[in-house]
Amino acid sequence: MLKAVLSVKENIQIEKFPRVIAFLKRNSVGYEPKKSKVLSREEIDQFLATASDEAYLLTKVALVIGLCGACRREELHSLRVQDIIQKDDNCLLVTLADTKTNIKRVFPAVGEGNVVNPVELYGKYARLRPKNVPHDYVFISYRKGKCTVQRVGIHSFGKMPSLVAAFLKLPNSNEYTGHCFRRSAATLAADADVYLTSLKRLGGWRSSTVAEGYIEESIEKKKKVCKMLMGEK
């Protein structure tokens, strides 16, 4: 970030100052950036299965799409009705045209064998959409079983993971931030032994280092590695 700001604002190339770079590296030793907590597969399934649609339908739809596409809150906020197509009774095809890296992503949300069917869940939400909505954004406000014409704000998406955590009575629910859905998707994919190249495509990451930074340390994953090292089959 410092490199980009100096280059754009002051036309200074920080690479020409090796002592500054060395100083910054020394001072960053031991620094751990604060990251959002992630939701486990069991916690996600529990929320989808037990939370009432009357109170949480909007959050459920955002959670399912956010997980399946490792979406940022900005990407959910900019999603339009024409970006979601029903392929069959168990699959939605979602296109993210407006992304941070300007890389269009297309991903399926599949319901076969899952706790909820994304097609049915999204269909229930879409049918509540008023006819006089003056825009084509997917997510509109939802309260007590009814939708309004008002578009869901970007900060509301940032609060949704903490609402899920609070419903599940997880400790420190405020630490489940707007990046929770994206980090949870990356962690679940890594736990399922998804190849790094596939993970990068899922989240639209160009850098392997950045993609790996989204993966939460998993005890279950470490158990698999330990069993392999110990020769257990």
Image (tube, rainbow, N blue to C red):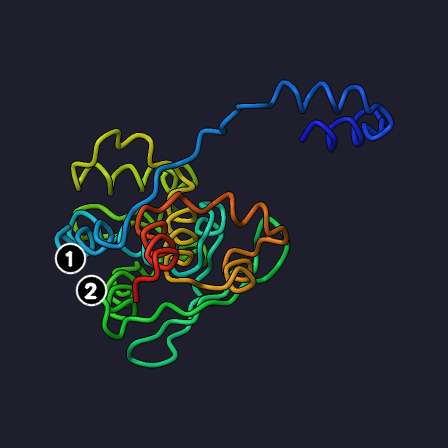
In the rendered structure, the answer to whether residue 44 lies left or right of residue 97 reads left
Q: Is residue 159 above or below residue 227?
A: above
Quarter-of-image position of residue 105 = bottom right
Residue drawn at the location 45% of the way across and 63% of the way down: 194
Image spot of residue 9 (x, y percent): 79, 26
186, 143: nearer the viewer:
186
- Disc 2 residue type? Val
Which badge, 1 or 2, comes first in the chain's sequence?
A: 1
Q: Quadrant of the N terminus?
A: top right
Q: Nearer the viewer, residue 137 or 189?
A: 189
**Marks 1 and 2 in Cβ contact (< 8 Å):** yes
Q: Residue at x 56, y 63 (%)?
A: 197
**14 displayed left or right of 154:** right
CA distance for labels 1 and 2? 6 Å
Residue kind at label 1, given as amino acid type:
Ala
Circle 1 is placed at which residue position? 49
Q: Quadrant of the C terminus?
A: bottom left
Which label number is shown at residue 225? none
The residue pinned by badge 2 equals 115
Q: Residue at x 55, y 58 (%)?
A: 200
